[in-house]
Image (cartoon, helix red, strand yellow):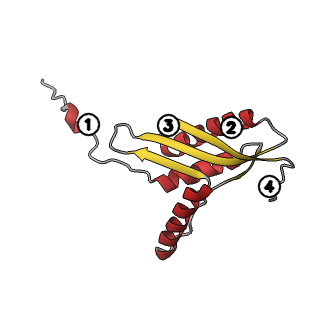
Amino acid sequence: MTTTVPDDKARVPRFRWVISEPVIAAVAVRAAVGVPGVVRLEPGLTGLASQVARSVRQKINGLAPAPTEGVRVTVDHSAMPSILRVSIDLVASGQDQAGIVGRAVQREVSRAVATATGLTPQAVVVSIMDIDSYGTGAW
């Protein structure tokens, strides 16, 4: 009796999942704001412009936009596996050490994005834009 072993090429999937940057950014936002010591995320000038454009596109299509303010995601889908970088701009509480908050955000965002998407960020860059002395989030 002879057994035929399937060719390795037959096992290679013929499809590829592409997860868009706004989806990854929404996961990152949720993870970052849950870290103790994070008062809020700051969108910055670039973030405001892209947020407005994205919100308009989603409203035209009848979708409710997920919050992505303060997070920028770049994904290089041409590489295998995809190369993912996340940048986060935030305001930290004056009650916590900024370095500890930043490292906690890096760990939590990396974990959450990997869990939700299967993509592990190559880099999670945290920029602390301001320190809220009272930790209330009020301007």
Q: Find residue 24 and report its horizontal and vertical position in percent.
A: 52, 50
Q: State how far apart marks 1 and 2 are (Cα).
A: 42 Å
Mark 4 / mark 3, whichever is N-terminal: 3
Question: Which numbered tag is attached to residue 77?
Answer: none
What residue would you read off at disc 1? 11
Mark 3 / mark 1, whichever is N-terminal: 1
- Around disc 3, counting alpha carbons within 10 Å, would you say few (fewer than 14), some (14 to 19), or many (20 or more)? many
Q: Quadrant of the C terminus?
A: bottom right
Q: Amino acid at mark 4?
A: Gly
What residue would you read off at disc 4? 137
What residue would you read off at disc 2? 102
Q: Using residue 79 as the reference point, say whether residue 102 is left or right of it.
A: right
Q: Residue furthest top?
A: 1
Q: Nearer the viewer, residue 39 or 34?
A: 39
Q: Find residue 129 and report its horizontal and vertical position in percent.
A: 69, 47
Residue 103, visible in the rendered structure: yes
Q: Amino acid at mark 1?
A: Arg
Q: Residue furthest left?
A: 1
- Around disc 2, counting alpha carbons within 10 Å, would you say few (fewer than 14), some (14 to 19), or many (20 or more)? many
| Marks 2 and 4 close (CB-CB < 8 Å) | no
Q: Secondary structure at mark 2?
A: helix
Q: Amino acid at mark 3?
A: Thr
Q: State how far apart marks 2 and 3 are (Cα).
A: 18 Å
Question: Which numbered tag is attached to residue 120?
Answer: 3
- Around disc 1, counting alpha carbons within 10 Å, would you say few (fewer than 14), some (14 to 19), or many (20 or more)? few
| Marks 2 and 3 close (CB-CB < 8 Å) | no
Mark 4 / mark 1, whichever is N-terminal: 1
Mark 2 / mark 4, whichever is N-terminal: 2
